[in-house]
Amino acid sequence: MARVSQAELVRVLTGIVGADNLSTSRPDKVAYSADFWPRAQIWKLAGEVERYPPDCVVWPKDTAEITQILAYCHEHLIPVVPFGGGSGVCGGTVPIRGGVVIDVKRLRRVLAVDPVSLTVSAEAGINGQHIEDHLNAAGLTLGHFPSSIMCSTLGGWLAARSAGQFSSRYGKIEDMVLGLKVATPDGAVLDTAERAPGAPDWTQLIVGSEGTLGVITEAVLKVQPLPEARRLRAYRFRHLADGLKGARAVMQAGLRPIVLRLYDPFDSLMAFGKDPEQKTSPRTRPFDAIRSLLSSPSGGAHDDAPAKKVPGFLAKRLEPWSKKAKHAAITTALSAPTLLNRLAQAAPSPCLMIVGFEGPAEAIHADAIAADELLTACGGVDAGARLGESWLEHRYAVSFKQSRLYQLGAFVDTMEVATTWDRLETLYHGVRSALSPHVFIMAHFSHAYREGCSIYFTFAGYRKDAARLEQHYERVWQLATDAVVANGGTVSHHHGVGLSKMAAMPREHGEMLRVWRALKDAIDPHGVMNPGKLFPDTTEVAAGSAGGAARSMVRS
Amino acid sequence: MSSRPHAVGYLDELRQIVPTEQIEPQLDGDEGGGSWAVEPATQVELVEVLRWANQRHAAVFTRHPRRSDAQPPFSRRPRIYLRGRRMKRVKDLDVVSGTITVQSGITMAELDELLGERSFTTGFPTRPWRQESLGAVLAAALDAHWGPRYGAMESEVVSLGVVFPDGTAAGGRGAPRRAVGPDFDRLFLGSRGRFGIIYEATLRIYPSAGRVALSYAAPDLATALATVHAGLLAGLDPRAVEIVTPAPDREWGKKRVGLTAQNPVLVLVEPWGPIAGRPVSWVDDHFAEKLVKLEPPVGWNVHEGLLPAPRAWTAPVVALSWRELEALAAELGGDVPAGLWLVRCSEHGGWLSVAAGIEGQAADTVRAALVAHSVQKPTMWKRIQDQLKAELDPKDILNPGLG
């Protein structure tokens, strides 16, 4: 196969999408060389603003243009990276082998809304908030509210099995999707709704494939009527175990809260810090410095915790300090994570739970009373409605910038794992004890289901220079995923795999990865679709297989 | 037993893997490669049997033997009929998480009894499937009515353990939801043992409903549909809703349930119950206002007194949206087709079919709607399905001939 020159590639793709919808400019290459993966921020700290630039970026207007691009790249073994909002935090859209980035944001139409059967059909590039606004105007809601909703797309949600903050009631995106259209590298468009009797559920074999099988172009999803009322309350538990028991009791009683989040002691301390009734409590003062570490005014887009603004009293206290002193305090604290974690663990803080219901007013009133009985029986103390409402109000109050910790030469990242209720506490303690000597760590439990729950860990680490910071970051992730697997959890509940968790996939799936290799060889035999992501390349696992053959075949 | 030397050799080899009492000779032709029903008792035995079959290019079936199996193209291959009835160990009953992990050879009746003793259920109506194994139900009955009443069968499976045709075992760990790539378990659910043998499954379990709390009779399909749809939109959140019209020869069943000529459509509702916070009376008030309440309430196995056995359900079971269901009801008018069964109703629609052998214009109208909304012709996925088969089972040993 002759290599394609950059000029030839640009000429052909320009013929498909038009000159205005193709770019080889450096700013675009920089912009599309990474997503919100913290490791890519560490590269930037080291001075590499574009470690993996694509050869070009295209903005096709419809499925027909996408199929033409895919067919050309398939024929010439040119890597293709589908791109939605770029809000991923696992490096899923980093074009590590160059090639063509297909940004689908021009495919943004809502194709049909059926208010009788409660379904919506939309193109994959539509922004999350835009589809929700469209549905709201028709008296409907998708019920999918990831914290990245304003900077992520429908296609991205489906590609990475996204979860919204109301997943306990409405499910994850894979529970909402009824069918997909996916453009495959051979230029075909497959409709997963065309499921013949005795055939597998193709929808669930495409959802979560992170652009490695094709480009999702359209989807049909379930929607819900806009709720008549919504009610949120907070509860305090003396012990984490009691809170978990309460959460399980609520879910297994058949109640369907929109949200049920339980914060561990330190995460609760941060939340209580914003409570006027609690902020004057002297017992929180020794932890102000710790709280300030992660209460950056510019938390990352991946952070689905409430907005963490520096509280006024804290800002006042820190005001006189020089930037250098603050820097030193934070980096010194992060350099001794064991001590910091012990301090946080010893925080005399209860665990805070936010629980909420929405639907017909009478029904949610009854649900809230039932939940109250169950939570109180497990040791919960009603902390009123304000904290819950505050959480709801600030749930999107993230700036979509990376944390200020990066400016100090540190990193902050999150890991969302899940397991069944019987293993949940063991998993929590297992990950904490594995990471505590290396990073500062806290967590909350959210996305609760009948049979289990997700744990959302946030951790921050520091090293003096960027090279060692990257090594440290890699080591921390290795330890974290090892601990998750050893304690019977899944390493990702809703962020996906991308590059960051790929190494854990052979242990997560074991021999089931054979299904993946068969799928990949059947749909993308040249391995052009988002190569090097999700699962280790078939070329690395089984030498000689066609999959993963694509490298950047573009000559500059 | 065949006296042909190669068949005897194969039998000796099989005896090295499983005890003789777990091998039962089956009818075979003169030129046959040997034919046996084999009952592995453990996962290890299953793995070894499949490894042997792969080496010997045997044909491995998960169904009963047929006369035609002794004819080409399988006649010269050794044939194994896998029986799972010795693999029925419960590996884990996790009442904390509400799951059960069980080997696939357990019959649905055994599973139901086991869970029933502990006041749990999988939600499967068990009587029609008494003799069927869990593995068979998961592998073959995906699109049937007799699946779990609380959701599609796939959604009730937390994880699967599978043996590939070359004898490699693979099993996922249970998690409530995952975002670690595609859901590979879905390849084996409903694909009838073409890609691998399900040896164990982790299923969701629920507190037993005991008896259906509520049952109602409607004068026609449109009224039944409208009442159910309105109830779902009002947020009643029942655990399960079904609509049934009895088959013509089920007079005794109709009388027992309380259906009449004026109100021939049965609506079954299982509310979550008071523990979920909402009084049962809310559900009852809604349905009783528009339909005739039936007393006493009927159990979920009422279907057997009203509908033909599972084998009579040869028409496709099709997911129809409320818009499509309402259009069908409008077309039928007051004409109520017998043998109609709508299951797993949600805010978005339900799964509909009609029993075979029901005559009349109304039944024909329903059948036409089912055909119109079902995928009949091979789709573009057929090529991918065939390629998957070729990759995972290159010697075509597992259930050959299924396509």
Image (spheres, coloured by chain):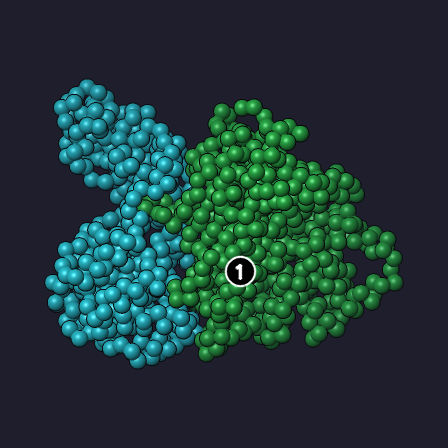
In the rendered image, residue A59, in percent from the top left (x then y), is placed at 59, 45
In the rendered image, residue A435, in percent from the top left (x then y), is placed at 65, 48
Does any portion of residue B22 appear in the rendered image?
no
Query: Which chain hosts label 1?
Result: A
User: Of residues A65 and B383, which is closer to you in this image?
Assistant: A65
Does any portion of residue A121 appear in the rendered image?
yes
In the rendered image, residue A45, in percent from the top left (x then y), is placed at 76, 43
**Residue B386 versus residue B109 in the image, above or below:** above
In the rendered image, residue B217, in percent from the top left (x then y), is placed at 23, 73
Q: In the figure, what tint was chain B given?
A: cyan
**Residue A98 versus residue A383 in the image, above or below:** above
Identify residue for label 1: A131
Residue occupying the point 51% across, 75% down:
A229
- Picture quarter with the C terminus of chain B: top left
Q: In the figure, what tint was chain A given?
A: green
> Does B24 sit left or right of A411 as displayed?
left
Residue occupying the point 73% across, 71% down:
A279
> Does A550 sit left or right of B40 as displayed?
right
